[in-house]
Amino acid sequence: MIKKIVLLAVLMLSGCTTHQSLIISTNLKYEYDQPEKVLHTYNSLILKGQNWWVSHEVIDETRVYPNMDLGSEYKNFLRSIFIPKYREDLSSNLVEMSIKQAAVFGVDYSKVIQIHRGSAEIIAYFNQTENRGYMVIFDEALVHRFDLEGQEADFNKLIKGIKSR
């Protein structure tokens, strides 16, 4: 019994926990397993596990593509990569870019996931050939992008880890 109490105290003092929570907006959080490494770059947070990594960034419509401001069309453009019906209202240039980006991601439209967490819309796709997952979250004020490299089970954990606050 004393050994268990000592072990628990050591774990608590060392800050070791198996689950972490990242607040990504006033409405959403991402609950994830303790990564081996956490990296931060200009606008990206990268969590690295033993056999996986996941990155998060807030999308800036003026920086999705160099020298191109997508302006008010950027949300439908991002949706159109995964769900073709959103291409109907886009300019021909953006339709062409959407088709090309979907090809880069290897999107199989029949396997795209579209769900909601509270008022947020989540669109996600996992490419089984490349073991890469892509997820875009349309929150009230922000658009988030998550990319994952790992197994499909890791991607499913990512999707399940997005929760309302």
Image (spheres, rainbow, N blue to C red):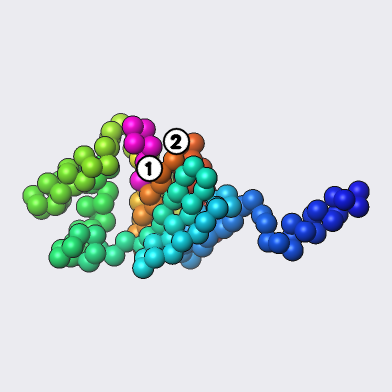
Horizontal side of 32 relative to 43 (left or right) equals: right
Residue 45, above or below 157: below
The answer to which image quadrant residue 127 occupies is: top left
Check disc 1 and give the amino acid type. Gly
Q: Position of residue 93 (x, y in %)?
A: 9, 52
Q: In this figure, which residue is indicated by the disc labeled 2?
A: 152
Horizontal side of 70 relative to 152 (left or right) equals: left
Q: In this figure, which residue is indicated by the disc labeled 1?
A: 133
Q: Are marks 1 and 2 in contact (CB under 8 Å)?
A: yes
Closer to the camera in the image, 77 or 18: 18
Instruction: Estimate the spatial distance between the alpha carbons at disc 1 and disc 2, rounded to whole Å.
Output: 8 Å
Q: Residue at 85%, 50% (x, y): give it.
A: 4
- Residue ranking furthest to the left: 92
Say which element carries label 1.
strand
Image: magenta residue range: 126-134
Q: Position of residue 115 (x, y in %)?
A: 41, 44
Horizontal side of 95 relative to 82 (left or right) equals: left
Residue 65, above or below 161: below
Horizontal side of 76 relative to 155 (left or right) equals: left
Q: Earlier in the sequence, mark 1 or mark 2?
A: 1
Q: Residue at 57%, 58% (x, y): give it.
A: 21
Q: Residue at 38%, 49% (x, y): give it.
A: 147
Check disc 2 and give the amino acid type. Glu
Q: Position of residue 51 (x, y in %)?
A: 49, 42
Residue 27 in magenta?
no
**Mark 1 closeness class: few <14, some 14–19, many ≥20 residues within 10 Å:** many
